[in-house]
Image (cartoon, helix red, strand yellow):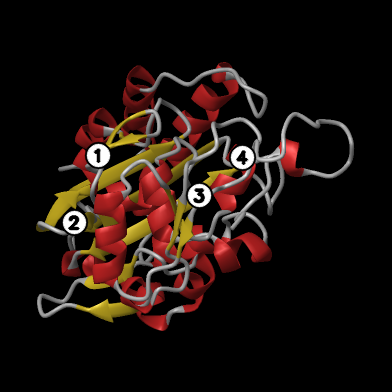
Amino acid sequence: MPVYRLPADRRCGRRRTGATEGAVTAYVRPRSLRDALRARADHPDWLVLAGGTDAMVGAVRRPRPPGVIDLFGLPALTGIDRTAEGALRIGAATPFARIARDDRLRAHAPALAAAAREIGALQIQARATIGGNVGTSSPVGDSLPVLLALDAAIEVASVDGDRLVPYEEFCTGYRQTALRADELIVAVRIPAAAAGLRQFWRKVGTRRAQSISKVAIAAAARVDASGVVTNARIGLGAVRDRPMRARAAEAEIIGQSPTAEIAQRAADAALADIAPIDDVRSTADYRRTVAANLVRRFAMWLAQPGA
């Protein structure tokens, strides 16, 4: 059953290279998590499809998969609930539209809810899933700097069991992850401690909506009653081969009451850590300037009471 069409499948006469070229030859839609894990174990080379928003774009340039495991809407992977420890658990197949409007997430992880509202158009938000964002591990994935800032963890599973991987250790390179060939992403966990943090999210793109990030920042901090930053985590997107923590910038802020001087030091420290590229969306120089400005803005935002 074809799930998406490669150029060879389009009946427009431009490419006629064979009756089956570009066709997906096998398709399964599991009815339970157990069935999904068995399908993954039996077919580790098949495409795991959730919302399909990245797969549809990649269909024109990537080799066709021998088969598809369709997880979109699988109840065991969809929904938001709270664990006994107070963490919020987001099913991997939960679309961003649901994340954006969930009251618990808006209170507990407002940076993630804000990012969800800015991912593509409304149609993309209705299909794209947080598990897909994590699994594709694109440097420009909008939710991924938030997961770094909030110290999120990724729940993965196989027929042999499950494990919890800190997101900071999950993305290992450009579109590379620590996921094993027989594993599926099951959920994203936002720790209970995130609820007490001041959270910041900004995205810079070509326009205010329906754009891919040129640079994105998500940050979270704890500020004591005297205005001193006691903890801070800064995640940046589109400035390296993977989403990254700006540790040097964090070090400039922690233990300080932010001032213009502190903010500039944090911005300079971030510049030393990033390695953006020139591409069709932006230039490396522009990304450096914007990333520094966003880090500086976050530091100054922390200086505002009640921000």
The answer for how far apart the CA atoms under marks 1 and 2 are is 40 Å
Residue farthest front in this picture:
19
Q: Which residue is mark 2?
A: 158
What residue is shown at x 29% (from left), y 68% (from top)?
35
Amino acid found under the numbered disc labelled 1: Ile
Q: Nearer the viewer, mark 1 or mark 4?
A: 4
What residue is shown at x 47% (from left), y 53% (from top)?
68
Viewer-closest of 285 and 90 = 90
Q: Secondary structure at mark 2?
A: strand
The quadrant of the image that shows the N terminus is bottom right
Q: Which residue is mark 1?
A: 253
Q: Is residue 125 left or right of residue 137?
A: right
**Mark nearer the N terminus (1 vs 2):** 2
Q: Which mark is residue 59?
A: 4
Amino acid found under the numbered disc labelled 4: Ala
The answer to whether the residue labelled 3 contacts the one labelled 4, judged by CB atoms less than 8 Å apart, is no
Q: Which residue is mark 3?
A: 202
Q: Is residue 199 left or right of residue 201?
A: left
Q: Secondary structure at mark 3?
A: strand
Q: Residues within 10 Å of mark 3 (few under 14, many from 20)?
A: some
